[in-house]
């Protein structure tokens, strides 16, 4: 049985930053290596803490070099054909398949097409991400279609067979990664489908969140501020009261990532998501 909504968020979660909406094409660009470009949509450049997310475009017949991180990374194929490899274990990605690599293991991504780019959503559990290039000395192992990763190392989520659950009316969510699924992981995230009329309750988090709208039209409500979103990513700082709703006649989909290990939403009274009921407004009762 779920707990009743809180009348207001805890005072200890009072936010110190505003939300940021970044359309695709308006992010911070970085040429990672020849033929590989990152558009950072949530990160240190817009005040995010503990998290970086964005889109990586890999040119036809190009591979992102094998590398390691000191933090976890999530990779989700949005468009094209690609292989994600972790120390030689190769996963052929279909659209919206997801691979999560904890800190340490070497990994790479290769574009299988010689004519079309591959576009991937990436999330890194750091606001100052770095990488260390390593030699590709790993024997190639083609992982079976039903593989779900390697215990203690990577997790592989096949989108078409992943378990769904309702996070609100007319929604279907998938948990791709969190500390329950991958002990020791620093972040959590997944996929959310909103059918027409689908929405989440008003809520807050005790950490920053990135929400990338990858299909359809979304409306993001933050303390009464209304942000229509299409092909865009939202930064929701810790403590901001918000929710998403699909007011269109078509499905809407998102990839969400929390800068915290568990996907915890603290549900609050719906009035907190209005201008009049904003718990952080000047003069609001504490």
Image (spheres, rainbow, N blue to C red):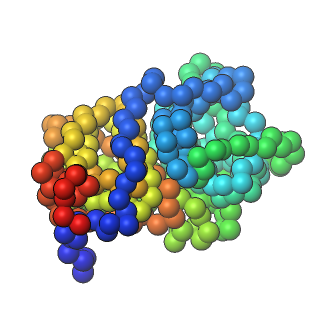
Q: Of all residues shown, which one is farthest toward the front? A: 283
Quarter placement of the N terminus = bottom left
- The residue sitting at 57% across, 26% down in the picture is 29
- The residue sitting at 24% across, 34% down in the picture is 228
The answer to whether residue 61 shows anywhere in this view is: no
The answer to which image quadrant residue 252 occupies is: top left
**Percent x, y for residue 33?**
72, 27
Quarter placement of the C terminus = bottom left
- The residue sitting at 72% across, 22% down in the picture is 34
**Percent x, y for residue 120?**
54, 36
The answer to which image quadrant residue 71 occupies is: bottom right
Q: Is residue 186 above or below residue 112?
A: below
Residue 96 shown left or right of residue 184 in the figure: left
Q: Is residue 69 above or below residue 94?
A: below
Q: Is residue 101 above or below residue 248?
A: below
Q: Of all residues shown, which one is farthest toward the top? A: 115
**Percent x, y for residue 274?**
15, 50
The answer to which image quadrant residue 278 occupies is: bottom left
Q: How many numbered discs? A: 0
Q: Of all residues shown, which one is farthest toward the bottom? A: 1
Residue 276 shown left or right of residue 216 in the figure: left
Q: In terms of depth relative to the viewer, which is nearer, 225 or 155?
A: 225
- The residue sitting at 75% across, 36% down in the picture is 65
The answer to whether residue 6 shows anywhere in this view is: yes
**Percent x, y for residue 210?**
43, 46
Residue 211 shown left or right of residue 92 in the figure: left
Residue 285 shown left or right of residue 120 in the figure: left
């Amino acid at each position: 049985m779920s707990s009743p909504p809180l009348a207001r968020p805890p005072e200890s979660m009072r936010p110190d930053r505003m939300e940021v909406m970044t359309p695709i094409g308006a992010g911070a660009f970085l040429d990672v290596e020849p033929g590989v470009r990152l558009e950072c949509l949530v990160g240190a450049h817009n005040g995010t803490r503990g998290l970086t997310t964005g889109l990586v475009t890999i040119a036809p017949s190009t591979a992102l070099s094998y590398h390691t991180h000191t933090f976890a990374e999530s990779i989700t194929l949005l468009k094209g054909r690609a292989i994600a490899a972790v120390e030689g274990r190769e996963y052929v990605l279909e659209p919206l398949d997801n691979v999560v690599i904890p800190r340490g293991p070497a990994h790479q991504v290769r574009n299988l097409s010689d004519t079309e780019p591959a576009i991937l959503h990436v999330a890194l559990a750091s606001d100052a991400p770095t990488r260390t290039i390593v030699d590709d000395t790993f024997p190639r192992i083609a992982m079976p279609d039903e593989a779900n990763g390697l215990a203690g190392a990577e997790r592989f989520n096949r989108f078409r067979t992943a378990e769904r659950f309702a996070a609100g009316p007319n929604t279907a969510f998938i948990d791709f990664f969190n500390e329950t699924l991958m002990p020791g992981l620093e972040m959590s995230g997944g996929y959310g489908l909103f059918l027409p009329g689908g929405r989440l309750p008003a809520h807050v988090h005790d950490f920053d969140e990135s929400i990338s709208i990858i299909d359809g039209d979304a409306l993001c409500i933050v303390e009464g501020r209304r942000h229509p979103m299409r092909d865009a990513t939202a930064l929701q700082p810790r403590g901001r009261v918000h929710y998403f709703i699909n007011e269109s006649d078509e499905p809407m989909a998102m990839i969400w990532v929390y800068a915290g290990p568990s996907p915890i939403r603290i549900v609050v009274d719906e009035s907190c998501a209005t201008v009049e009921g904003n718990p952080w407004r000047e003069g609001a009762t504490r």
